[in-house]
Image: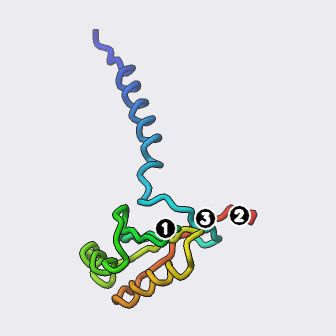
Amino acid sequence: MSDINVTPMVDVMLVLLIVFMVAAPLMTVGVPIDLPKTQAKELNTDSKPVTVTVTTDGATYIGEDAVPFEELTARLATQATEGLEQRIYVRGDMQANYGSVMKVMGALSGAGYTHIGLITEQAPTGQ
């Protein structure tokens, strides 16, 4: 028999497609928070930024790791591969105290980091 049976290969590929479709939304960064919505456009960056999260109760996280505020800049220095030129994104929960988010940004700026950005969600175009 000289024919190639591709049915098993197609079955395996469909299963893999379903697995990746289910797993992809679970691979988002870190701590679940409710981000504010804005009309700002998405930034395209080449390097992978470090993400600092401020939750509703004021707790701070680097990536998914909880970090006391007092140790934030010291721990960030160990993860910043580009030194003070590292791009840092701050994710602040919409219900978080404005002062908590500004306190984190002030600490980052005071430590010498210059590329600090705030992350928001894209608002629907009708709002």
As drawn, 2 above or below 26: above
Comparing 100 with 108, the one in front is 100
Q: Amino acid at mark 1?
A: Thr
61 to the left or right of 77: right
Q: Position of residue 39 (x, y in %)?
A: 65, 71
Amino acid on which disc 2 is placed: Thr
Q: Tell me the element at label 2.
A: loop
Residue that sits furthest to the top in the current view: 1
Foreground pick, 114 / 95:
95
Residue annotated with mark 3? 122
Q: Residues within 10 Å of mark 2 (few under 14, many from 20)?
A: few
Q: Which residue is mark 1?
A: 55
Q: CA distance from mark 1 to mark 2?
A: 27 Å
Q: Quadrant of the N terminus?
A: top left
Pointer 1 or 3: first along the chain = 1
| Residue at x 44% of width, y 87% of height | 106
